[in-house]
Amino acid sequence: MSATPEIIFRTCTASDFDFVKQVHFASLREAITHSSGWDDEEQNRFVSRWFKPERVQIIQRITQCNAEDAGFLIVERQKDRIFLESLSLLPKFQNQGIGKLILKGLITEAEKSKAPITLLVLKANRARKLYDSLGFIQTFEDRTHSHLKWEGPRDPEQSGALSASCPSEH
């Protein structure tokens, strides 16, 4: 990766349902298949249950003068924590630093608000390595998921995020 990727967030609308479902299917099929088995109908029902456009931000990758939908982000901000519900990217946008940029933006927000970041990640999800590299620690594990928490940098080099910031819910 030669340069920091440029990204923006746009508001999700009801018409983005098919895109969000496509991203969910493309980004998590392998990990879900490995963890518990994949069933298209079950995954359709799953996405239909949690999809609420007002909770979702669409991640767009900026290339030259274009903005291309790359994935989606769901963050729930509470008084005592920031819960990263989902950060999913289409495979062609993975391993470009986009996820790391977004996570570092959340870490900056967490540092300022003095709130931890919590999340669940499928044990078979390759993103686990990224979370570990940014100082997330496992607090619990069940059959399919690891429960992770970021409470602060483990070393000074992990502090100080890149310039991107995540959209805030007001």
Image (tube, helix red, strand yellow):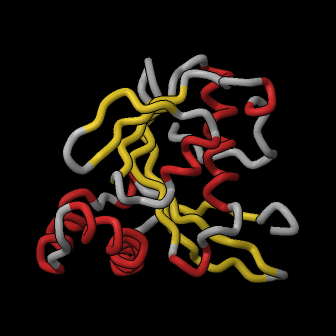
User: Which residue is at 45% across, 42% downward?
Assistant: 84
Is residue 8 placed above or below 29 in the rendered structure? Answer: above
Could you tell me residue 7's position as x and y percent?
71, 63
Residue 58 is left or right of residue 2, and the answer is left
Res 21 quadrant in image? bottom left
Q: Residue at x 80, y 31 (%)?
A: 157
Front one among 120 and 78: 120
The spot of residue 57 in percent (x, y) is: 50, 58
Q: Residue at x 76, y 38 (%)?
A: 161
Instruction: Inspect this view and state whether residue 14 appears.
Output: no
User: Is residue 14 left or right of 39 when viewed as pictured?
Assistant: right
Judge left or right: residue 40 versus residue 145: left
Q: Residue furthest right?
A: 2
| Residue 74 sits above or below residue 111 on the image | below
Residue in the foreground of this view, choosing between 71 and 95: 95
Please indicate, yes or no, whether residue 5 appears anywhere in the rendered image. Answer: yes
Residue displayed at 36% across by 43% down:
120
* Image location (x, y in percent) of residue 145: 29, 46
* Relative height, residue 27 to residue 120 (above, below): below
Could you say which is closer to the camera, residue 25 or residue 59? 25
- Of the 4 image quadrants, the one containing the N terminus is bottom right
Counting the numbered discs, the total is: 0
The x, y position of residue 65, in whole percent, is 82, 82
